[in-house]
Image (spheres, helix red, strand yellow):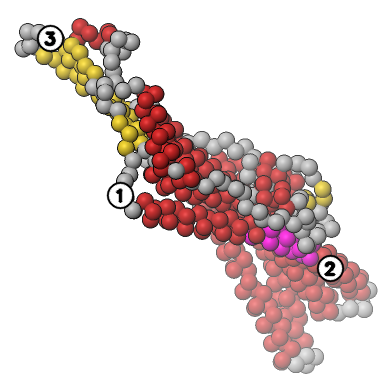
Amino acid sequence: MKLRNVLLLASLGAAFAGCGLFGPSYNKPNTQNPDEFQSRDVLAVNESANLPMMAWWEKFDDHQLNYLIESALANNNNIQAAVGNVVAAQGFLRQIQFAWIPTAGISAGYNERSLIAQGYNFQATPSYSLNIFQQIRSQEYAKANYEAVLAAKDTVRLSVISATTAGYFTLLGQDYQLQLQKQLVEDLKGLYNFGKLQYEEGLISLYQLQSYEQDYENANAQVPIIENNIVASQNALRVLLNQNPGDIKRGVKFNELNSYGVIPINLPSQVLRNRPDVRQAEQQLIAANANIGIATSSFFPSINLTGLGGSASDALSNLFSAGTDYWVDAASVSMPFLNFGIYGQIQQAKGQYYAAYYNYLQTVRSAFASVDNDLSAHQQLTVSLKTQTKAYDSSVRAYKFAETSFHDGLYSKPQLLQNAVVMDKAALVLQQSKLQQLGTIVQLYQDLGGGYGYKNNESTIKFGDGHDWD
């Protein structure tokens, strides 16, 4: 039977089955994107740069931060696991794509007893079974699945960049916090010691002395907690770098980090295009839509071709020549007649599409909300930081005035130390405020999908357990 006859039969079968069974076409959901965000960050600056490719962390001018991110992107275990998932999805796609190619089993042997065809024997049995419409939708499904896994890898890259940056800022902040806390302890200790002398001379009450002691002990108790937090932050960064526990080198000091003028402003449509989780959700929706087509295409006929070719060793050179009738008259077209389970498969596929549809809408809505929240948080915390900076500057001026007055004999040592304690506490509040403001910058760039495309050329590496990738 000629192949064109088989295709004709397939077309006729498709006509009988009904073309509507091919499955629905994909239509992108209308998410009603707003023209602008409700929250406006007046501190944001307009940028035309491609956010996924933007190395936004370089705006902080810290070479050590740049090194950490480069190292994390190259060595992080979660990224490598995501790369493996991409390779697997690519293999599945190729498997579907190669389904158009017939398969063949080959066997060979040697016959020394036969007087007619003594010598080597060769036999090849090709087979080919294909549902054309199912193949088309399966390929669409595999392609969308591959794109979804690829987007999932980008999501992991995005989270690693954010976690590394936030972890590094936290570590620098804790270093500075420890420095400030030790200074506060020293000043409170001095105030407590002078309080004991004043109490012995009857100048202050026991209640006042105990208050000095409690402040000193409470502040001193925070020092080991901060030191432990520094160890935990270092180890968290080492895990991101795929390294064992150890020290992390520092670059720019925390109080020297510039946290102003590094925020971009983008339209919601750009946010959707940049966020890999939105891409992943849409590709999952496309895959679910194609899966309906795969289920419904079961009603279409399948083309089945089998053949048997073989000859003695003296005919091996002519095996694949034009004269060899490799495909024998074993072609057929088959299609289901009584298989009500297909309807259940279609219902299952439609239910999965329904879930994927609303998962996509939820992802988009969350993207809009998170960016709007980030813009509001950055602006408000930046205003708070400026207010705390003014309060700290005021405490510094008060301390300098008290220091001058102390040297002039107008202030006592306890009064000077009390001004020092106020300044120390104001510095600690300012440190926490700046750390929170830096956190809003990191979160905003993550929600904008910034930086995940930077040097996005991971490939599989050698296994560490003796297995080779090749």
Point 40% across, 34% down: residue? 12
* Residue 225 visible in the current orientation: yes
Point 45% across, 53% down: residue? 349
Mark 1 — residue? 338
Q: CA distance from mark 2 to mark 3?
A: 99 Å
Q: Is residue 313 above or below residue 183?
A: above
Q: Is residue 115 above or below residue 58?
A: above
**Element carrying mark 2:** helix
Q: Position of residue 376 (x, y in %)?
A: 76, 63
Q: Nearer the viewer, residue 364 or 84?
A: 364
* Magenta span contains residue 368: yes
Q: Amino acid at mark 1?
A: Leu
Mark 2 — residue? 387
* Magenta span contains residue 254: no
Choose mark 1 or mark 2, whichever is in front: 1
Mark 3 — residue? 117
Q: Position of residue 216 (x, y in %)?
A: 68, 78
Choose mark 1 or mark 3, whichever is in front: 1
Q: Nearer the viewer, residue 81 or 165?
A: 81
Disc 2 to disc 3: CB gap under 8 Å: no
* Residue 413 visible in the current orientation: no
How many neighbours does mark 1 have within 10 angstroms: few (below 14), some (14-19), or many (20 or more)? Answer: few
Q: Is residue 225 above or below residue 27?
A: below
**Element carrying mark 3:** loop
Q: CA distance from mark 1 to mark 2?
A: 76 Å
Does the magenta stretch mainly form a helix, a strand or a loop?
Answer: helix
Numbered range of the magenta stretch: 366-382
Q: Position of residue 345 (x, y in %)?
A: 39, 53
Q: Nearer the viewer, residue 120 or 304?
A: 304
Q: Amino acid at mark 2?
A: Thr
